[in-house]
Image (cartoon, grey):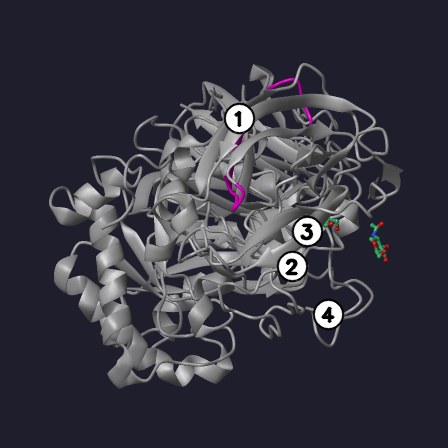
Amino acid sequence: MIAPSKFLLGAMLCSAVLAISHGESKGSKSGSTPSQSGGTGDGSGSSTSDSIYKLTISNKIKAESIFEMDTFIESNINYATDGGIYAELIANRAFQNPAGTMNGFNPSASDEIGHGTTEFWTEVGKADLALVSTNPLSDALPQSATITYNSQKTAAFGSGIVSNRAIYGIANEGFFGIPIKAQKYILNFWMRSDAEGDAVIHTGLYSKDMSVTYVEDKTSRKLTKEWTMYTVKLVSSKSSDKLDNIFAIFLEVGNKNPTVQVNLISLMPPCWKGTVARPDVAQAILDFAPKSIRYPGGNDLQGPTLNARFDWKQTIGPLHKRKGRLGNWHGWNTEGFGLVEAMNFITAAGAKPIVGVWAGLTGDGKVVAQNELGPYVRDAVEMLHFLLDTKGEWADMRVKNGGPREPYPIEKVMIGNEGQLPATKDTYGYRWAAFSQGIQRDFPHLTLIATAPVDTTTDVDSLNDPLYGTPSDFVSKYNLYDRLGEAFGSNKDLKHYNLEFAVINSGQGGPDENIWIGPHRLHHSILQGSLAEAIFILGMEKNGDIIGGSAYAPELANDSNDGAHTQSTPGALEFDVTKVVKSTSYLIQQGISRNPFDQIHEVETSFDVKNANIYYSAGSNKRTKQYVVRLVNYDASEKVVSVEIEGLSVRRVNRYQIHNDDPNISNDLEHPNNILPKEDVLPSDAFSQGSIKITLPKYSFTTLTIST
Ligand SMILES: *[C@@H]1O[C@H](CO)[C@@H](O)[C@H](O)[C@H]1NC(C)=O
Ligand SMILES: *[C@@H]1O[C@H](CO)[C@@H](O)[C@H](O)[C@H]1NC(C)=O
């Protein structure tokens, strides 16, 4: 029913394949004065005086943990997908970007297809660029562009001039510049003309004023009235240190000067490992080693309007059959990073997908009535058949659309997004019931995660609790999950998730009335905020028998030009077109994700966590048999702690540590390496006395991986 195989799928369009390597406090001494003496400052803590901060890890397993440190590729927001992880270099490649403004949940832009603009495109030479609806390329792309010769035009482009060439065409400036490296690019474009005959078509990469040509292809083509897709390999032997380069497609001025109609002009650099992902972004996600990756969403799953909801069937198949949709946060989702491309990327990154299904609510606050939900439930169930069936019609369709023969390793499905928001929470009960029952009938083994508390908690297995706030909001929730049994007394088996959280406001200089728009909203993660998040995560890990996983949001953020076009700050990974920066939050969570434990152990402490400002979690790893202890020193002074594993002698200790004396420090595009993890092996004199003695620098996060 989809994708005649002669058409290239998005996943095959990249110009090359790049392989990249993977990579409760007992409080018995609460109130005692923290000691600052004894620390050597070198982190090995070879002090002789006894620390008053003592942690004793029981050698007995308290509970099995299901906790995972995950990530969340939130689509559309901050250009995470188009212009972000999706390697496509041409912005508005099919003239879909809508007119009108986008303001998150209140678009005045049209959500109808065929109402695009020429945003990001400019005329080059003696050309007129116009949008037309005649002779559409496909039902999905009803509007295309015409390039017409105009002898009256003085050939100008931007601030520069192409006066030395008699040409007419169009140029694209890329999402926020086109990076040019000495590498191969694959260009695909569709073209037709009413004037049949031969024409020489030029395509290439140039400096902004076209004074420098990095690579240019010049091919004589037979133009026909039928749309034809042309593929060009553009191999640049030069690279550019500038970002404001352009891509251009044009004809030479001659006798005939036919008008050409173009659409879906796509330029792909080398991608990561058979996916359509940008290699450096992919590598950064890989470095994290997430167990699961949540996709798509959050608000962009809902979509700004019903017409612009995430509709999985519109995200698969040949690119010229994908109509895309109005983005929730800006522009138009091309859906080039569609369901199959996303699932292929997530599994290639060694993670399991946590998929969201659209659940009857849109960003404009409209909700589908209970008696009209049927077709949407069917859509969600069919999406899961497409992703999970081992054989039959849906499995065949998955393979035909670029997916694998074997099903994707999906175990968890989220029903909607942020169903708890006030305007809609009253409807979540019936929406949850309809979707969860529909899905459970065909997929009884899936874990279904509710995105709002429902009235009858007894029929909900799992619940997502998003959290955004200030550092102190997060620190105060260290013990939140210790008490969950009481809060959800009627359903003791309820599992919790926190698949979107972030410290978004520094809380410094007094609390803002509104943390989202107040003056202390953070642009980048700061160390203090990231440590506060870590304290919250450690609290979840301690309760890993009932907390299934956690993910920072958003994962990706275009931060070019000082974040002027970022819709939600901070981001775990901030990028422009040339680099990806790992934030302090990312680096701390990486230390958790890479060193997981799946068995929780009880910890006895000689101190009260809140007084000492030292927070912890501890457990062991079934497979490696190692113990894992995490410590956050949230204090302005260093602390010498001792860690003992009851009855066991320590053989080797690996340390992963994030620390800086300045709690306000951030990594950003200008200063990507302000803070880097320290990874080392503790000298054996740090644990020669049976317990591990270690100095925790002020404002530090430490994971110790201990072999006994
Ligand atoms: C990223 O930020 C830059 C600068 O603010 C902006 O021009 C651009 O449109 C944004 N998005 C993308 C995908 O480039
Ligand atoms: C962090 O920044 C805030 C706001 O600029 C400032 O008030 C505070 O003193 C800084 N903290 C430290 C320890 O420098």
Q: Is residue 220 visible?
A: yes
Give the residue drawn at x 27%, y 56%.
Answer: 383
Rendered position, 381 above or below 612: below
The alpha-carbon separation of the residues under discs 2 and 3 comes to 34 Å
**Label 2 near label 4: C-beta < 8 Å?**
no
* Residue in front for this viewpoint, 590 or 284: 284
Q: 468 or 406, which is in the foreground?
A: 406
Q: Amino acid at mark 1?
A: Val
What range of the chain is rendered magenta?
A: 180-195
What kind of residue is marked 4? Ile
Mark 4 CB lies closer than 8 A to ligand 2 = no
- Left or right: 486 in relation to 254: left
Residue matched to label 3? 129
Disc nearer the start of the sequence (4/2): 4
Q: Earlier in the sequence, mark 1 or mark 4?
A: 1
User: In 3D space, how far apart are the residues under numbered discs 1 and 2 (Cα atoms)?
Assistant: 37 Å
Q: How many marks?
A: 4
SS label for mark 2: loop
Check disc 2 and report the residue beneath it: 568
Q: Which mark is residue 517?
A: 4
498 horizontally vs 243: left or right: left
On residue 351, which mark appears?
none
Q: 10 Å neighbourhood of mark 4: few (<14), some, or many (≥20)?
A: few
> Which mark's residue is nearer the viewer, 1 or 2?
1
Seen at 18% across and 42% down, the residue is 396
Please give the residue where the numbered disc 1 appears in the rendered image. 232
Tell me the mark number nearer the camera, choosing from 2 and 3. Answer: 3
**Residue 33 in view here:** no
Q: Is residue 187 magenta?
A: yes
Give the quarter of the image for residue 680.
top right
Asked if marks 1 and 4 touch (Cβ < 8 Å), the reply is no
